[in-house]
Amino acid sequence: MTNEIKVPDIGADEVEVTEILVKVGDKIKPEQSLLSVEGDKAAMDIPSPAGGVVKEIKVKTGDKIETGSLIMIFEGDAEEDSKDSDDKDPQNAKQADDKKSDDKTSDKQKSADSKPAEKKSGGSASKDVEVPDIGGDPVEVTEILVKVGDSVKADQSLLSVEGDKASMEVPAPFEGKVKEIKVSVGDKVETGSLIMVFETAADDADSVEQSADSASEDSSKDDKKDDKKGDSKSDNNASGQSSAKADSADKADKGDGFVENKAYAHASPVIRRLAREFGINLAKVNGTGRKGRVVKEDVQNYVKQLVKQAESGSVAGAGGVGGEHSKLGFDLIAWPKVDFAKFGEVESKPLSRIQKLSGNNLHRNWVRIPHVTQFDEADITGLEDFRKEQNALAEKKKMGVKYTPLVFIMKAVAKALEDYPTFCSSLSEDGQSLIMKKYIHLGIAVDTPNGLVVPVVKDVNKKGIIELSRELMEISSKAREGKLSSADMQGGCFTISSLGGIGGTAFTPIVNAPEVAILGVSKSEIKPKWNGKEFEPKLMVPLSVSYDHRVIDGALAARFTATLASYLADIRQIIM
């Protein structure tokens, strides 16, 4: 026999079919997901209320459906056939209905009995706050954002945590007053870990008991209902289950769930579960479905691509076992384990958050990019004289600005990048093309008490020395105070690392991927330079340009460095 499958109770609003998860001929089990739909508030899956074989699919992707809409027709399975035979025998049918009623009463009673009671204290109750679904890996608590006694609203951030892949915040699943904090900075937590205890209004606790009481009352009422309503009870069960799914999807949308890096991936709950099983960050998967939705085939193709890269030894940071070298496709022996304490007194000092993040990035860039460093030096005698004159004038006019050598170097670099745009490019993900950037944003490495950061100064080629000086002072101050936002450190196309104020004659800076080159500036010094007739004292600054040899060859690097040196030797060329 055939069985019409309709949309259960999902509320009053229409939803859009975003993905059909089965096809004609598939054998379906009860509660198996049939469709993915999306409304104004949430994305959810429509489960099957019964088992059977898909005979017809009455909807297609993009259709609008609502509660009661016909979506599929099933051919009945063995359970349906058994039901038909029972219907033919009134006595058997009555016995089956009585058994269903008894089972339902028993289940509801068990549910009511097993419902945990809240711990009451006068007019309030204590409720545990646990870590929501953040994947399988433990994360480290880096900051506690509330304290005991604080009144917290639902979705307010409670903790900052950091894992191997991202930093994120844990939101409050409900409102209340912080009674206890069960974790401290540095602790490792995972999905389901107890982090806090909230004190909530007694009404919230009473509602739990009321729900248990109502379950008992419902079971008593069900016993008195007419046997003829057995079928409608079954329909209501399916509707209730689906409604619960919609509610849980709603909660996830409001913040109870976790979205890595706070980036939203357009995917159904089924796809999210699949991604969690494989440990995949959906934000990195290219969605080919309607409106950029990530579908099952996208996840499968992404996994296949990672497998191919791993087999060819070209994948970095894609997970797996065997340590960092294994991730990078190398078969290296592990570091020896040394007990340093047997040689003398030791102390373990944890790395700062910035040190850990930058360390991983630097290691990846050093191993994956074939570095070459071109060394040169520039005569900045005239530039330094001009800089000192302008600083004296600025101080006399009380302009509130100080010109540093770095600002002039930034302008010279911007001019050289216009002449050699390859240095302002990035290699595409597949390594088959260059992405040429039509803007010049320079990253400036800044040494802070917590480690190295690289804020970005935008449109350097379009700004004057005065404007750049003020902006550099401001962004350097923010960096040292730890007030840089993620936007302040994004968008760079070339980086400058200046150690001239400290010392050194040369060094090999590491390319800041996905950029393809970086300039290192060392301490300037007076050197004798031959002018054709005699030696003259000249102020020379050492330049070290590291570059990605896959993109830039040695001859081009030498020309770029020589051009940069010539601009620094005569800054009048910058305005030409």
Image: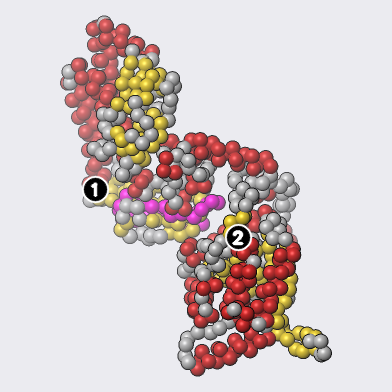
Q: Is residue 211 left or right of residue 272?
A: left
Q: Position of residue 206 (x, y in %)?
A: 23, 43
The magenta-colored residue range is 163-187
The residue located at (31%, 44%) in the rendering is 40
Q: Residues within 10 Å of mark 1 (few under 14, many from 20)?
A: some
Residue 364: in magenta span: no
**Nearer-N-terminus badge (2/1):** 1
Does residue 390 show up? Answer: yes
The residue located at (52%, 47%) in the rendering is 284
Q: Position of residue 208 (x, y in %)?
A: 26, 40
Q: Amino acid at mark 2?
A: Ser
- Nearest to viewer (mark 2 / mark 1): 2
Q: Is residue 115 left or right of residue 283?
A: left
Front residue (pair 211, 574)? 574
Report the residue marked by disc 1: 202
Tell me: residue 403, above or below residue 452. below
